[in-house]
Amino acid sequence: MNTPLQTPAVPTAEAIRRFVDTRIQPQAVQMDQDQEIPRALFTEMAAQGLMGLAVPAKYGGTAADYATLGAIHEELGRGYASVQNACTVFGMVCKPLSRFGTEAQKAKWLPAIAAGEVIPAIAITEPGVGSDIAKLETEAVKEEEHIILNGRKKYITLGQVADLFLVFARLNGRGVAVLVERGTPGLRVEPLHGLMGLRANMLAELSFEDCCVPAENMVGKVGFGFTHVANYALDEGRYTTACGSVGLAQACLELSFHYAAARSQFGEQLRKHQLVQKMLSEMITETKAARELCAAAGRLREQGDPAAITETLVAKYHASKTAVLAADHALQIHGAAGCLNGNPVERCYRDAKIMEIIEGTSQMHELQIARTFRL
Ligand SMILES: Cc1cc2nc3c(=O)[nH]c(=O)nc-3n(C[C@H](O)[C@H](O)[C@H](O)COP(=O)(O)OP(=O)(O)OC[C@H]3O[C@@H](n4cnc5c(N)ncnc54)[C@H](O)[C@@H]3O)c2cc1C
């Protein structure tokens, strides 16, 4: 890979807003229908600095601070949730790689990812293990200079097209994280089609049968896989998913404002009916509250405050629920028009629900928040 270490400046939320309005939103219906984000869009996004948001400048990234990162993910979520979630996955691989990876791993992969030449994916979930990640069953065996992987992974975002997988497994009972390149013998990738939401995320199921990678592909120490690498990735993913959910809620609000002004019933614009106003008021309030929770989490993250982990859980919990509420109200305000395939609120309705499942379900958030407050 011949990646020059040149990178655009850290993108601003305003620049990304323009990019979203001109390049992402107009393609969203097509991407949802095709169940695909075109590779060319990844290249365009890389040119905007979006693929390197979690990559240090030393490795060709744009290394955005958390306030900027949050504002950018809100814009992406407003544009199209599948694109926003793809960027979340880039962060979930690049952040732990930057922190726990060896110098050789960072030098090899981070510049190529930031340049959009390499698409990464993170493979935690298995057919039999979802929320309870401490019970992962994929097995890693160390043999001299190699690691042999056996097991299966499911629901892997970008799995259909990823060039590099950050895979979590168990070695002598202890968690490990291992980089596996696409095309490694023993790795099989099967597309998963027909998702309800985030349909363009090109999910895949992976199977590893005596899949042999160099021992130097391990990220972090043996035993750090779940406790450090996966948890760090999930914490990062929760923050950007929370901000993306705010964007999705904002999109529902904007679509509803527009429709409630354009359509009249009983001789008045929908927006003049008090019961419609109630829905809009609720959407405005909850979206603002979710945005503030994300901002609070972002500030603590920037300071490296340990309280950032709980604040991020709270933000993701509330923002994902807000996206669901806003999408529900938006569909209600649009009536039958919102139920039509191809209408943006119909897509938002399907996408919003997924936000309550990825990077930890709402129930897992409730349990973790309760634990933090020693309930
Ligand atoms: C669009 C999409 C993209 C995804 N991308 C990725 C990816 O890139 N990489 C990856 O590794 N995974 C990915 N996933 C998987 C995702 O992380 C899991 O779906 C999630 O962790 C939940 O696991 P599960 O679906 O197996 O649910 P389960 O863990 O089986 O849970 C099912 C239900 O039971 C509840 N539940 C479970 N345990 C408890 C408990 N102790 N108390 C109360 N309730 C409980 C859950 O909250 C949930 O409601 C993706 C999923 C989707 C839908």
Image: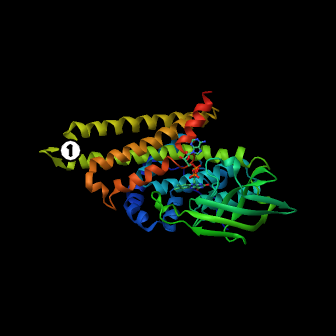
Residue at horizontal 57 percent and vertical 59 percent from the top: 155
Residue 247 higher or lower than 275, as above or below: below
Q: Quadrant of residue 308?
A: top right
Residue 290 in view (yes/no): yes
For this orientation, the residue located farthest to the front is 128
Residue at horizontal 56 percent and vertical 59 percent from the top: 157
Q: Quadrant of the N terminus?
A: bottom right
Q: Quadrant of residue 6?
A: bottom right
Q: Position of residue 233 (x, y in %)?
A: 64, 48
Left or right of residue 246, residue 218 in this image: right
Residue at horizontal 40 percent and vertical 39 percent from the top: 287
Query: Is the CB of mark 1 within 8 Å of ligand 1?
Result: no
Left or right of residue 259, residue 1 in this image: right
Q: Quadrant of the C terminus?
A: top right
Q: Nearer the viewer, residue 84 or 154?
A: 154
Left or right of residue 374, residue 281 in this image: left
Assign a secondary structure to mark 1. Answer: helix
Q: Position of residue 181 (x, y in %)?
A: 69, 66
For this orientation, the residue located farthest to the top is 374
Residue 205 higher or lower than 261, as above or below: below
Mark 1: which amino acid?
Leu
